[in-house]
Image (cartoon, grey):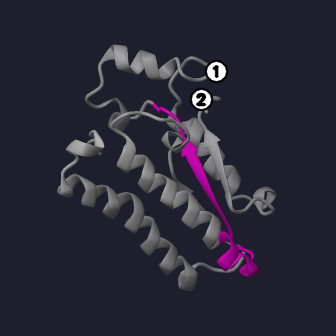
């Protein structure tokens, strides 16, 4: 996703973020309502940027905040079927998508924002997602869980 100051974000960039980050989750939840078996789990992905204030992330963070709220509401709507719904909020994670277009200095600055002073690894996020899909996590629902090394 290309981020931009709100005043400079094109309509095309705006629509793309709405389509991918918001509509994609919305339509997935609609389908899950009729196709997911009872006692299943839904884990949506948001972002730690919903808890920070980073210039150029205004629309991106707004779409991710919408995913968080939609997850909380959907947890109540579908919970009677034993389906738990949660949202994971990754922090800066060393993926190709995250690293693309960032200088070494930018990456080092972002890595320094958490308690461990490093970027997250994909497996750091995956472990949280996997746990939320287990029977041990069935009492956890409607939650937005930061997987960000204590960043926010």
In depth, the one of 143 and 125 nearer the eye is 143
Q: Is residue 126 above or below residue 105?
A: below
Q: Which element type, helix, strand or loop, lies under badge 1?
A: loop
Q: Is residue 86 magenta?
A: yes
> Are there few (<14), some (14-19), or many (20+) residues within 10 Å of tag 2?
many
Q: Position of residue 38 (x, y in %)?
A: 69, 80
Count the numbered circles shown: 2
> Are there few (<14), some (14-19), or many (20+) residues within 10 Å of tag 1?
few
Q: Position of residue 105 (x, y in %)?
A: 35, 13
Which tag, 2 or 1, sits closer to the chain's start? 1
Residue at point 56%, 37% (across, down)? 123
Kindly indicate whether the residue at mark 1 contacts the one at mark 2 (C-beta within 8 angstroms).
yes
Query: Label 1: which residue?
Result: 115
Quadrant of the image containing the C terminus: top right
**Is 95 situated left or right of 138 in this image?**
left
Q: Position of residue 102 (x, y in %)?
A: 30, 25
Query: Label 2: which residue?
Result: 151
Magenta span: 75-93
Q: Position of residue 116 (x, y in %)?
A: 62, 19
- Res 128 label: none
Q: State the image quarter where residue 35 is shown.
A: bottom right
Q: Is residue 133 magenta?
A: no
Residue at point 51%, 37% (across, down)? 122
């Amino acid at each position: 996703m290309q981020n931009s100051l709100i005043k400079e974000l094109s309509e095309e960039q705006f629509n793309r973020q709405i389509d991918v980050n918001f509509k994609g989750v919305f339509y997935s939840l609609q389908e899950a309502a009729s196709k997911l078996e009872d006692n299943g789990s839904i884990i949506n992905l948001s972002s730690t940027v919903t808890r920070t204030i980073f210039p150029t992330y205004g629309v991106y963070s707004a779409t991710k905040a919408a995913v968080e709220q939609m997850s909380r509401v959907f947890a109540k709507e579908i919970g009677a079927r034993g389906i738990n719904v949660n949202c994971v909020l990754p922090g800066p994670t060393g993926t190709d998508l995250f690293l693309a277009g960032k200088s070494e200095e930018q990456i080092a600055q972002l890595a320094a924002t958490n308690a461990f002073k490093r970027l997250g690894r994909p497996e750091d996020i995956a472990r949280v997602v996997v746990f939320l899909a287990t029977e041990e996590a069935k009492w956890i629902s409607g939650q937005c869980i930061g997987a960000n090394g204590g960043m926010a």
